[in-house]
Image: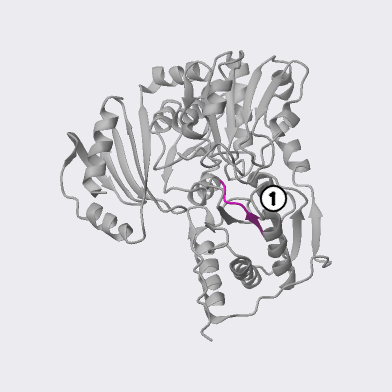
Amino acid sequence: MMRRMASTIRFGTDGWRAIIGEEFTFENVRACTQAVAEYISSTNTHEKLVVVGYDTRFESDEFAKTVARVLAGNGIAVEITDRPAPTPAFSFRVVESKASGAVIVTSSHNPYQWNGIKIKSRLGGSASPEIVNSIEQRANDILKNGVKVQIAPLNSDLITKFNPLEGYLAHLKTQIDLPRIQSSGLHLAVDSMYGTGSGLLQEILDGKSLVIDEIHSEVNPRFPGIRAPEPVEENLQELIKLTTTKPYSIGLANDGDADRLGIVDPTTGYLDSLGTFAILVNYLLAEKNLTGAVIKSITTTNMVKLLAEKYGSPCYETPVGFKYIGPTMVEHDALIGGEESGGYGFRGHIPERDGILAALYLIEAIVTTGKEPHTLLEDVYSLVGTHFYERIDIEITEEQRPKIQERLKTFDKNEIAGEQIQAIDTRDGWRFLLKDGWLLFRISGTEPLLRIYTELKEKEKITRILESSRKLIEL
């Protein structure tokens, strides 16, 4: 009988993700974990300890148990969570327990059919491309060659359970002016999107005069009513509506594993991640009078670069993903790092995005300034000028991928939609630098999507340039 060919494991921007029951199977999870174990054993000469976590998705807890058993079967000590929790809580635990790293079962913001694995380094940040590439190669070799995976029983002495929230939440409380927020009388609307952030802001901020109303706080791995647990405008319609019913100061939403943040202004509605990032940078540099470098991915706003220049701070730009942003934050002891997807990391915490801490800083900004988000953004505009942003996602097949790449590679015009191209940056996709902004074509590393991004100083130009972009790739 012919043996069925094993699926290929491929890591993207932040981890390996696949559809449950197709490529995300127990066989493939075992192979991926065996590869992690072999990598750790070959590179770590000290005591080996790995943190294992999971989110609220279908079977995430069972997949996590499988991960723990394979690691223990390879002689590696394991701390496995006793509950679903935010990805940044597990990253924090790595640093807290001086572990070799973490393996987290989560598919972050993907639709309910998906699950995945994120790998964290000993610093608590995303594993570097070099580490991920090595693990990916090992995992596929294991599947191809039918290598036997080592498995220990779940009651192995090498496997212990831990509470991932205790140390993490205690640390978050030290990062903000907690008493002032608790006595502020603010009304907050929160959408945890059926994910791991459920109830955490209430637990951190519990105070007599603070009111928090939360929706989608129950566990439901089908994420009913939303396409996916991604805190973007199309998925936050219920939160947007909620913020108009009472005198809320802000609406806050986290993705499925709570490492991203989306916000809603009660007056103007959804506020995109670029405006959110600019508000955070301006608050830390101007209101808190902190100093330090700002790190941004190429897909996020030029506003933070201009703000950094205004306050005399350096700004460094990276490819997409915290596997690039995190190490750059460490290298420069950066104050903040951020990306277009709504992920923000902060000095004094971990070199990784944290949607809960980002929410806390925004709440603190509102309390400190007495201003709602749209006014905080207007303050940014007064310093660096208006900036408008939009992103469209186009589903593509594997066959279309090389065709799109070839069209962009051979593009030789000096303008798009009447906008002069001043330079082309191909570090991560194809980014056309324009006089008053930029346009970027980038194939997603985690989903079968072509993403087209643009940021311009004039809002009326956005639609025209995106329409021209669609024609350019002829999809």
Which residue does the numbered mark 1 point to in the structure image?
Answer: 95
Q: Relative to residue 380, is residue 438 drawn left or right?
A: left
Task: Tell me residue 367's x, y (percent).
Answer: 63, 17
Extreme residue in the bottom direction: 1
Mark 1 burial class by Cα count in 10 Å: few <14, some 14-19, many 20+: some
Asked if the magenta segment contains residue 106, the reply would be yes
- Residue 75 seen in the current view: no
Asked if the magenta segment contains residue 350, the reply would be no
How is colour applied across the structure in the image? one colour
- Residue 354 seen in the current view: yes
When the figure is inspected, residue 31 is found, relative to residue 318, above or below; the finding is below
When the figure is inspected, residue 59 is found, relative to residue 142, above or below; the finding is above
Q: Relative to residue 224, is residue 213 drawn left or right?
A: right
Magenta extent: 99-108
Quarter of the figure that contains the N terminus:
bottom right
Q: Identify which residue is drawn at 66% across, 16% down.
A: 186
Camera-nearest residue between 241 and 316 = 241
Task: Tell me residue 398's x, y (percent).
Answer: 36, 60
